[in-house]
Image (tube, rainbow, N blue to C red):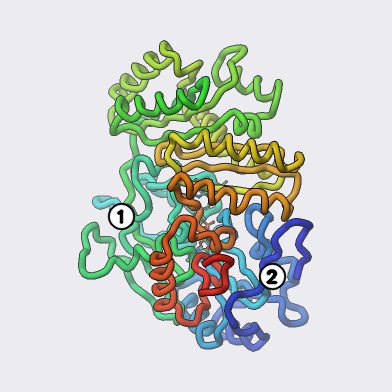
Amino acid sequence: LRRAPPGVRRLASLPRALSTLTSSDIEHFLTFLPSNQVQASLSPGSTPQDELASYNTDWMGKYIGGSRCVLRPRTTEEVSRIVRHCYERGLGVVPQGGNTGLVGGGVPKGADEVVINLGLMNQIRGFNASSGVLTADAGCVLQTLNTFLTTKGHVMPLDLGAKGSCQIGGNVSTNAGGLRMVRYGSLHANVLGLEVVMPDGRVVHGLRGLRKDNTGYHLHHLFIGAEGTLGVVTGVSLLTPPLSPSVNLALLRLPDYASVLAVFGQLRSKLGEILSAVEYFDHTAWAVVNGDGEAGKEVERQVFGADDVPPGVNLIIETSGSVREHDEAKLSLLLEELLEGPHVLTGSLAQDETQLARMWELREGIAEACGKAGKVYKYDVSVPIQEWENVLETLRARAEEKSGGLIERVVGFGHIGDGNLHINVVCSRYDKQIEQLLEPFMFELVASKKGSISAEHGLGVQKAKYIHYSKTPLEIELMRTIKNAFDPKGIMNPGKVVLPVGAGVDN
Ligand code: FAD
């Protein structure tokens, strides 16, 4: 096993007794998988453990597992045979997509779990131009699907900063929200059916692609957001909206958070059906992406086209519609009104694709910029938007008072259109003392506002033991019942999301 750097969480041992991986398991996998799809470090001459590191380490470098076997199936049949073997042997299974998850869910906890990486299952199975229904392998990268769809006059109903690496199977399994949710709704609204390999290896063939199907329980919804704890998603059928011929993007600088609330109300009422994204980021976020001091000011000059732009907070507003003149007239009129009022200091409207992409970078680059600035504790919460400023200021006061300078920045941003606040706490290192300062404090704070401790990233390893801050005992009991019914041996993604009784601190 690799040694974890100081402060990084070496994942603890598994909560249930699962079997130990042996070289006979690898030999069995090699009976039906070509050797280039099997990476294992169990016998002499096999893959060195270092080459397995990228599968064992999450995007933040915060969670590090020690799996000695990564399998890369190409077909559903291969996934089924792998999982059937693991079920018979009682081996843990970790489904893995693009490994961009932010709660440690796609990284194995121990050395004996088999990682099933879906990256080679990347075929588009079909697209129906009249219904807009896309059917694809779970391992297709989100951006690749979007590029394909634009050639067909459609668009993916979700978009997120990790689009170049995350996979549709991972998106479904985390119920990823992202930037377009305000317009197209969550994946529960857009996923029509799934193909799933169950923990015993049987395959649920649910790729029907029907808009209406009330024949019994809507089983596929259970896998959306299950984070790989109920089965391996191998195929996805989803509804894709038509590509809007007219997309506009504006960036506004506002003096304070009270103005954000005032402007957001106007955006909703005056842009109505063409509003497709509203993203908030505070000045700390601006500084982490563009640099403090003169560097950040220079970007302000370029983006807003003015000298001495006062500091404040920022909103990105996207509209998507079908009649360019209508959309532009609506947006321009509103922006003029806002610029004359007290709530907007200055603003800029993207004039072409390059400017549009540049503006999105300012928002989408925040997570990466925080990662470059230091080690990041991430909180992805749903709280009423009226409470965002209070939550951020409460946390900043705590950091200032108690962290002894170890917390360098508390960066606030998020999908204000759907109430999802992201807080990135940037520190010089991962440190138990900082973690204890932040957790469970953050979750108590969110619970006191009647919010959710996980808006869109899921629970994974990070928050599994804190589930009770957002769910009642009965809800947790029902989740365990479902988990036990689907996965009686507890092999699927062990130690994540819903822990067995007694395995968590509090649940
Ligand atoms: P992974 O990270 O590989 O896995 C995530 C979870 O899903 C794990 O529990 C894993 O076991 C499970 N899983 C993966 N594939 C399967 C499968 N085929 N079958 C069963 N289980 C599976 N998230 C948002 O919701 N909104 C955002 O705006 C957003 N922005 C991000 C920006 C950046 C820069 C980064 C790095 C991440 C962001 N994320 C966001 C988080 C992350 O990208 C999403 O959670 C994404 O959906 C994960 O997809 P993945 O393929 O990388 O999954």
Q: State which tag comes first along the sequence, 2 or 1.
A: 2
Determine the residue positioned at 55% across, 87% down: 89
Front in this rendered view, residue 300 or 489:
489
Estimate the x, y position of residue 223 in percent, counting from the top left.
40, 65
Is residue 140 among the parts visible in the rendering? no
Give the residue displayed 65% in from the left and 34% down from the top: 288
| Residue depicted at 66% across the width and 24% down the height | 296
Q: Is residue 139 above or below residue 381?
A: below
Q: Which residue is mark 2?
A: 66
The total of numbered circles placed on residues is 2
**How far is the residue under mark 2 from the one under mark 1?**
39 Å
Q: Quadrant of residue 22?
A: bottom right
Residue 142 in view? yes
* Above/below status of 109 relative to 305: below
Point out residue 198 in the picture as x, y percentages from the top left corner: 42, 76
In the image, is residue 263 above or below residue 77? Answer: above
479 displayed left or right of 442:
left
* Secondary-structure class at tag 2: loop
Q: Picture quarter containing residue 503? A: bottom right
Residue 331 position within the rendered picture, expressed as x and y whole percent measured from the top left? 35, 22
Is the C-beta separation of discs 2 and 1 under 8 Å?
no
Can you say whether 474 is above or below 372 in the image?
A: below
The amino acid type, in three-letter code, at marker 1 is Val
Q: Is residue 131 left or right of residue 97?
A: left
**Along the line of sight, the residue nearer the viewer: 160 or 443:** 443
Q: Residue at x 40, y 17 (%)?
A: 338
- The image's mark for residue 133 is 1
Dot 1: what SS? Answer: strand
Relative placement, left or right, of 479 versus 87 is left
Q: Closer to the camera: disc 2 or disc 1?
A: 2
The amino acid beneath tag 2 is Gly
